[in-house]
Image (spheres, rainbow, N blue to C red):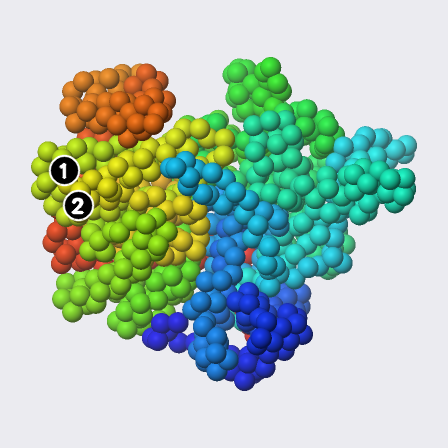
Amino acid sequence: MPKAVKKVANSSSFSTQSFTEAYGRYLKYSRVKDQYNLSVHDQYYSLALSVRDEIINRWMETQTRYYKQDPKRMYYLSLEFLMGRLIENNVLNLGVESEVRESCSNLGLDYDELRQTGEDAALGNGGLGRLAACFLDSLATLSYPSIGYGIRYEYGIFRQEIVDGFQHEEPDSWLKHGNPWEIPKPGRAVKVQFGGRVLKPHGQKSSEYEWVDGEEILAVPYDLPIVGFHNKTVNTLRLWSAHATEDFNLKEFNEGDYFSAVGAKNEAERISKVLYPNDNNYEGKALRFKQQYFFVAASVQDIIRRYKKTHSRFDKFPEKVAIQLNDTHPALTILEVMRLLLDVEHLNFEDAWEITQKTCAYTNHTLLPEALETWNVGFFEEFLPRHLMILYEVNRVFLRDVSLKFRGEEDKIREMSLFAEGAEKKVRMAYLSIVGSHSVNGVARLHSELLQKNLLRNFAQLYPEKFNNKTNGVTPRRWLYQCNPKLSELISSKIGPNWVTELHRLEELESFSKNRAFLEKFEAVKSQNKKVLAELIERKNGVSIDPDSLFDVHIKRMHEYKRQLLNILHLVILYQRLKNDPDALPVPVTAIFGGKAAPGYFMAKLIIKLINSVGEFVNHDRETSDKLKVVFLEDYKISLAEMIFPASDLSEQISTAGMEASGTGNMKFALNGALTIGTMDGANVEMAEEIGEDHMFIFGLRAEEVQEIRTSSTYSPWDVYNENPEISNALDLIGSGFFSPEDPDLFEPILYSLLQKGDFYLVLADLEDYDRARMEAFKLYKDKKAWYRNAVINVAHMGKFSSDRTIKEYANEIWNLKPVPED
């Protein structure tokens, strides 16, 4: 913990002595170990359980407080949560680091080693899941009554290995050593049904049906405490694990059919086995569909159970319950709430629909039309027949409103229907999310504007009052206070500690941007962080890099629109320049990449191979290796990110304008003192407004220009190729097999996508301006005083991008949620 940050007043139960006693007790009675046979995991587990004692005290106090006051609660449904390692985050948020460190010292434990021991809880693919984790942190820190709901995947996102430059996927068995933070709650298990038939029981109301004869699966909750920062609030993340209602068929077992005897158990547990199964075949798609309903059905049952503890009627449901859908993965929530209100709680359709709409809200996370989730109607017919009936009725009512709004425009019926007709009839989940919610928000101002102008234009015209913007943010607790303690301590020494929960206070740093002594200390912190990362790179990659070089970093999910290809193509150009002129670069540069490609995404995986092939060649060229290095860090995850952000000099945010919803890596980089090179896309636009474009390196086409190119079809990548010899030479070099002598045609698909298929992501269109901006950055880095003055200004203007601010906007403008702090 930075020395300048004050601790929360501890509860009387927590002290160095009580912690030390708890550690010994857990080591002996939970791990059954002594000093002669314990492992580092035994130490970690005992340490975590000792910290958990204090968490549980506050957790129970928080839940008691909520139940006594009966406030409105918000339920955050997300198929992804990227929580990362938890021990350090929990210790810092509790405010007990000094006690834990003192106890570890007395016990002969290395706390710094142990805090790196726990597994990354990588229950997500990228930004969506990490945003959810940041939101949970802010909700607890601000004492908002809330619960997160997701799936307890036995295997998280795959562990990435780079073999001969290619990505290979290995299972991420993050639970292999157990998870000391979770609390199993088998007594709160609920049944989830798939398949079966729908009956109309005699004498029931016209809106009531009975869903029978389906396959039942047990959803068992595991609760993870979410600790607020330096307060007494501990909220809950409830993750569901799938189990069979019966472990095995005893009759089949006794008859010797052992595989069939346990078949139902194995089939049931597949649902929570792995994050996002490969969905390029029927089995994978069906499993993903079942995953989405499984966690939605369990969560909605749990939400209604909580509501009915204190309420017998449902007219107050929207006043006590807010449900936020994090993207379209939980869209089935709308149909499940309707089903339970109709068939179990016996409401009529009109009342149930009004309650559902007032309760649910939807966050959209994409501008890519192909990323708008759809499901074949056949899946509904097979697995959710009752929900399909409700969906048809919802669509009928909705299209009635459409026909009234757009009289004479018959095409609107087809365009806006919740069903997409075609060779295979599909359900449009984003449309269902919009129709069934009272609020639809984008995650950056530009994103929200483009949603209403383009992707969801018809719905914005129909429901203008629903659409709003909530620009993303990140929690400063993990992404500065925890991951960059030296910089946190320096900041607190100048402006005090309150910035950790009031990030706008960072603006007070701007007055130090011309203070020579402060800039020298700022640079020293950055230099120390870079040395740590350089040591990691040498240990992991076998590449020796210069810590004084400019660390130019591009870490994020591998996708063509994020344009890692633009980056590596430009690095090939820089390499060619260095071969012709050893002084072509004003400063040594280390280009660092990291990110995972979806297992079935051929082009993204090929770009990873290209990065590694270029790096392998460039790093061993004695004529250039002291000026340019290219490194790909495998298995990018939260714990690695916590080392990369503090060490970065230049942040690559170079997506095709109009395609990135927001981004949060851009915020984490700037918060840690990196300068941004980027397009005016996503949250970069608002960052430029806050920081000032003159303190960033902005380049490239703007979103409206990209749209114009798309509609006019006037752009030809061949023009760029023919007019710029550096670009054509770089492409020819790649195409010739220079970087892939073992397979000269290996990278031909990349060249084909750029030249023959029209360069959809406008890599070549932006390359010249990218070169200009990047060279400006390299030149500025030569003047360290000017560079770090800009870095301080970047940090000083990041106050807007706290997830605390984002959550307050959600609470005030969407959820109508009030904090319930400690009495």
Q: Is residue 800 at all visible to an observer of this figure? A: no
User: Disc 2 marks which residue?
Assistant: 627
Q: Is residue 556 at all visible to an observer of this figure? A: yes
Residue drawn where x is 10% and y is 33% of the image: 580
369 displayed left or right of 259 = left
- Res 27 → quadrant: bottom right
Residue drawn where x is 55% and y is 65% of the image: 41
Outermost residue toward the bottom? 17
Quarter of the C terminus within the rendering: bottom right
Residue 144: x %, y % from top left: 54, 61
Checking the image for residue 578, the label placed there is 1
Residue drawn where x is 44% and y is 50% of the image: 637
Picture layout, residue 13 above or below residue 749: below
Residue 343: x %, y % from top left: 79, 39
- The earlier-in-sequence mark between 1 and 2 is 1
Callout 2 environment at 10 Å: few (<14), some (14 to 19), or many (20+)? Answer: many
